[in-house]
């Protein structure tokens, strides 16, 4: 090759080289560009899907990545205060509206505070929102979710059927009427004696004793009011102590309990495990005793006997029976007592209402006998007082948590799967769009027929609704009416010396059941002839 060829070759090389380099570079650049475009498309698609999904989520406070609304809740409620958590949630409802989504780490919590949205959850999508979140309360205090409140599926359906047909049926009410009448008369007599001694009356204690004895008599048999057993260290107070502990530990829901990862700290599970063992030991004594009685061919007398003598193919486990007993005692004693205490609180704050209901009692019942259950239907103002109390002071301000297993539409929103849903029953009863002057205790709203006829179920939900609605509602109402009727017919109620009616406060305590923050203590003066207080 001559020097010219060599020059040509080197020129060609110098021309070809950049070209071949450029071609490979361009290929690579195009490849990268395609990748970038692909990821951009995916990213935009994802984020528009996310925006679309977020647009469908119910409103709520700002959600931080992963932590969600936790920092916000933590700053206002702290990790360990259940009362502040409730206050914070109520304040957020006012800001974000009647359906609000909170996120606590990876847990979604939906708070529903209007009748309209509650109807969507409890009627339209009852089947989807019927589940309960898995939690220590269900595991230990719900006897492995074998009780009514934490059971799911067929087992829950079967227990609810038992409630309707056997436990809380009208036949069961009728056959148990003498037990509650006897206990109401006991309450009347002991209040009469205390009033004669000039003692101040703790209304909560008196009503708790009445409800506890009535329910224990009905559920466990009158012989089991107080299981005293020295070898097992059971005293007369053991049952009350156990039940109080259940209510305290179940109601102590704080941010720490709700936050995944933090909820195992603090020993709450250990406390519930220990309580579960003590409850099992207590109920086992009763089950053994009742089983022995039934084996000697005794007729079923109490509701626990009904549960123990079910046919072989319908038999319940001991866990299920103990769970039903615990649910009924806790689910009955505390909300009934809280309701009666609130009713009397409001009557003493409003002496004209107390006078009006006592006049009605005198007109309908007269002064010669203590009111009978059959007379309640004629006492329209008295009934209005009970309804107004359940509206303004529902004993369960918030529902137990419901949960959905699949994403579920509610109104225009989409509630993600596995969301914990709570209905704010107190907010529903105090909704200013539905109830004029909602914070005023005014039973007349239930007796003025025009307004009263427009009150539908979803304006007032003190017992919940649907598959998870309260199975003991009828029994609850009867026991509230019975104890309140005896109290207002039997006595004039006044604040303690030195107090005026409006010194009687209406502050609420935190917890599963919404009690007055302090027990109501009053002076009672008998209104009837002394012979009527004797039993
Ligand atoms: C004034 C009295 C009562 C009130 C205000 C009341 C209120 C409620 C409320 C609001 C619920 C929850 C509904 C929900 O989660 O959405 C409930 C559930 C329940 N209540 Fe009552 N209740 C009362 C009396 C009773 C009585 C007397 C019993 C039994 C003897 C009882 C047993 C239960 C049970 C077992 C559940 C759970 C139902 C389930 O999950 O299927 N309650 N109650």
Image (spheres, rainbow, N blue to C red):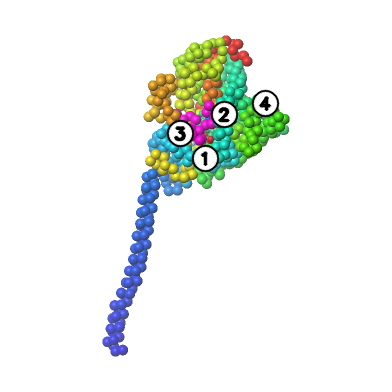
Checking the image for residue 313, the label placed there is none
Q: Is residue 313 magenta?
A: no
Which of labels 2 and 3 is toward the front? 2
Which range of residues does the magenta coloring cover? 460-474
Q: Which numbered disc flags the more N-terminal residue, 2 or 3?
A: 2
The CB of the residue at mark 1 lies under 8 Å from ligand 1: yes
Q: Which numbered disc flags the more N-terminal residue, 1 or 2?
A: 1
Q: Which residue is mark 3?
A: 424
Q: Which residue is mark 1?
A: 132
Q: Give me the C-alpha separation between circle 2 and circle 3.
A: 26 Å
Q: Is residue 463 magenta?
A: yes
Which of labels 4 and 3 is toward the front? 4
Q: Give me the C-alpha separation between circle 4 and circle 1.
A: 35 Å
Residue 248 position within the rendered picture, expressed as x and y whole percent measured from the top left: 56, 34
Residue 434 position within the rendered picture, expressed as x and y whole percent measured from the top left: 39, 28
The CB of the residue at mark 2 lies under 8 Å from ligand 1: yes
Q: Residue at x 59, y 34 (%)?
A: 324
- Count neighbours of disc 2 (C-alpha within 10 A) and say few if under 14, some if 14 to 19, many if 20 or more: some
- Count neighbours of disc 1 (C-alpha within 10 A) and say few if under 14, some if 14 to 19, many if 20 or more: many
Q: Which numbered disc flags the more N-terminal residue, 4 or 2?
A: 2
Q: Give me the C-alpha separation between circle 4 and circle 2.
A: 21 Å
- Count neighbours of disc 3 (C-alpha within 10 A) and say few if under 14, some if 14 to 19, many if 20 or more: many
Checking the image for residue 168, the label placed there is 2
406 vs 174, left or right, is left
Which of labels 1 and 2 is toward the front? 2
Q: Which residue is mark 4?
A: 223
The CB of the residue at mark 3 lies under 8 Å from ligand 1: no
470 vs 440, left or right, is right
Quadrant showing the C terminus: top right
Q: Is residue 448 visible?
A: yes
Q: Give me the C-alpha separation between circle 4 and circle 3.
A: 39 Å
Element marked by disc 2: loop
């Amino acid at each position: 090759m001559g020097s010219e060829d060599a020059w040509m070759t080197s020129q060609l090389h110098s021309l070809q080289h950049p070209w071949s380099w450029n071609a490979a570079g361009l290929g690579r650049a195009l490849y990268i560009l395609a990748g970038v475009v692909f990821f951009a498309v995916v990213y935009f698609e994802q984020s528009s899907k996310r925006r679309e999904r977020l647009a469908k989520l119910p409103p709520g406070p700002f959600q931080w990545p992963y932590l969600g609304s936790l920092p916000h809740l933590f700053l206002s409620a702290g990790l360990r205060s259940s009362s502040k958590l409730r206050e914070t949630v109520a304040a957020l409802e006012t800001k974000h509206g009647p359906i609000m989504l909170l996120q606590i780490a990876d847990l979604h919590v939906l708070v529903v505070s209007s009748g309209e949205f509650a109807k969507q959850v409890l009627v339209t999508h009852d089947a989807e929102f019927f589940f309960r979140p898995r939690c220590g309360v269900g595991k230990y205090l719900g006897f492995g979710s074998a009780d009514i409140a934490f059971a799911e599926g067929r087992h829950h359906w079967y227990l609810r059927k038992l409630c309707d047909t056997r436990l809380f049926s009208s036949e069961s009410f009728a056959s148990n009427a003498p037990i509650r009448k006897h206990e109401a008369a006991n309450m009347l007599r002991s209040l009469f004696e205390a009033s004669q001694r000039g003692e101040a009356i703790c209304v909560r204690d008196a009503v708790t004793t009445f409800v506890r004895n009535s329910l224990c008599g009905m559920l466990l048999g009158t012989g089991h009011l107080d299981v005293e057993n020295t070898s097992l260290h059971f005293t007369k107070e053991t049952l009350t102590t156990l039940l109080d502990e259940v209510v305290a530990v179940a109601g102590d829901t704080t941010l720490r309990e709700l936050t995944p990862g933090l909820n195992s700290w603090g020993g709450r599970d250990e406390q519930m495990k220990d309580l579960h063992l003590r409850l099992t030991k207590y109920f086992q004594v009763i089950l053994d005793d009742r089983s022995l009685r039934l084996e000697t061919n005794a007729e079923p007398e109490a509701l626990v006997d009904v549960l123990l003598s079910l046919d072989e193919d319908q038999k319940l486990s001991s866990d299920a029976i103990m769970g039903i007993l615990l649910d009924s005692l806790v689910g009955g004693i505390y909300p009934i007592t809280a309701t009666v205490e609130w009713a009397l609180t409001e009557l003493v704050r409003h002496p004209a209402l107390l006078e009006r209901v006592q006049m009605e009692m005198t007109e309908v019942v007269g002064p010669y006998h203590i009111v009978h259950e059959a007379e309640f239907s004629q006492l329209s103002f008295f009934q209005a007082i009970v309804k107004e109390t359940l509206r303004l002071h529902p004993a369960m301000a918030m529902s137990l948590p419901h949960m959905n297993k699949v994403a579920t539409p509610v109104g225009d929103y989409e509630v993600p799967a596995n969301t914990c849903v709570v209905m704010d029953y107190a907010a529903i009863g105090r909704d200013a769009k539905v109830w004029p002057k909602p914070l005023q205790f005014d039973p007349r709203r239930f007796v003025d027929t025009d307004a009263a006829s427009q009150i539908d179920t979803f304006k007032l939900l003190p017992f919940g609704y649907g598959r998870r609605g309260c199975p003991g509602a009828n029994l609850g109402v009867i026991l509230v009416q019975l104890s309140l009727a005896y109290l207002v017919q039997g006595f004039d109620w006044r604040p303690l010396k030195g107090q005026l009616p409006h010194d009687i406060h209406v502050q609420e305590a935190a917890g599963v059941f919404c009690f007055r923050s302090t027990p109501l203590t009053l002076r009672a003066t008998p209104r009837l002839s002394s012979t009527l207080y004797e039993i």
